Amino acid sequence: MTALLFRDLKLSIRAGGGALVGVLFFLTVVAVIPFGVGPDLALLARIGPAIVWIGALLAALLGLDRLFQAERDDGALDLMLMQETPLVLTVLVKCLAHWLATSLPLVIASPLLGLFLNMSEKAIGATMLTLLVGTPAITLIGAVGAAVAVALPRGGLLVSILVLPLTIPVLIFGVSATYAAVEGPAPFMPPFLILIALTLFFAVIGPAAAALALRNTSD
């Protein structure tokens, strides 16, 4: 499992692996919004957390179609299905590698974009914390869509269509927790705990559903 983790990290970091593309897409989306909204710094500060969350969500969806595609192309997927290690554990490790390579850089880059959007220090900290907790759920949900579409030659669009509706609750509670921490009067902890619960829920359901989809696809 450790070898699989480092292998997937290396593949993601290489040119064309998707990690750098996701970060650049995230930076581009968030950087373009102020030009459309205008120079109103108060408005940018108010909608900044939502913009950062939407940009991170869209960037996290990039590259999900390649989560199992390399193994499908070179035949390694058949070996994963036949090995003694449970396929659920293998899928979970691949999701961890994908999150470390694609979503964690988005979390690290979010403070810089928060400054660009005139967000306060408290808003930047809350946004970064909610992204750190919520982005794993997006990856785990995306693993299911990637497993369903792995047999298709061009399943990238299908993965986004399947995954995007399921990620809306993560987006809602992530943005709600951020605004509660900054503005109030609603408390921060309830939506933040629900966000943690969503991540834990999909940590159980996501790998199991993806493993089942991979087995059905191979059959």
Image: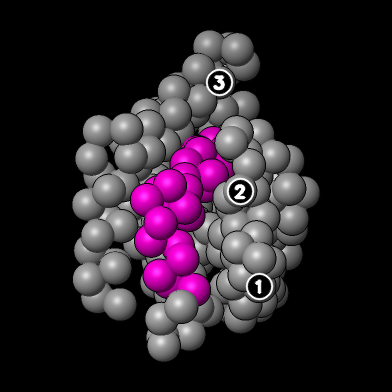
Q: Is residue 65 magenta?
A: yes
Residue type of the residue flagged with mark 3: Ile
Q: Which mark is residue 151?
A: 2
Q: Nearer the viewer, residue 84 or 134?
A: 84
Q: Nearer the viewer, residue 38 or 10?
A: 10
Label 2: how many residues lie within 10 Å, few (<14), some (14-19) or many (20+)? some
N-term mark: 1 or 3? 3
Residue linked to disc 1: 212
Q: Which of label 2 and label 3 is nearer to you?
A: 2
Give SS at disc 3. helix
- Residue at (66% x, 72% y) in the render: 212
- Please state the extent of the stretch shown in magenta in the rendering: 54-81
Q: Is residue 217 left or right of residue 108?
A: right
Against 76, is 63 above or below?
A: above
- Residue found at the far right of this picture: 165
Q: Are marks 2 and 3 in contact (CB under 8 Å)?
A: no
Q: Nearer the viewer, residue 193 or 56?
A: 56
Q: Is residue 84 visible?
A: yes
Q: Is residue 141 visible?
A: no
Please state the horizontal and vertical placement of residue 69, each as a whole percent of the image. Answer: 47, 48
Residue linked to disc 3: 33
Against 136, is 63 above or below?
A: above
- Residue at (41% x, 88% y) in the render: 84
Residue type of the residue flagged with mark 1: Leu
What secondary structure do most residues of the magenta stretch adopt? Answer: helix
Q: Is residue 58 magenta?
A: yes
Gap between marks 1 and 3 measured at Cα:
40 Å
Image quarter where the N terminus lies is bottom left
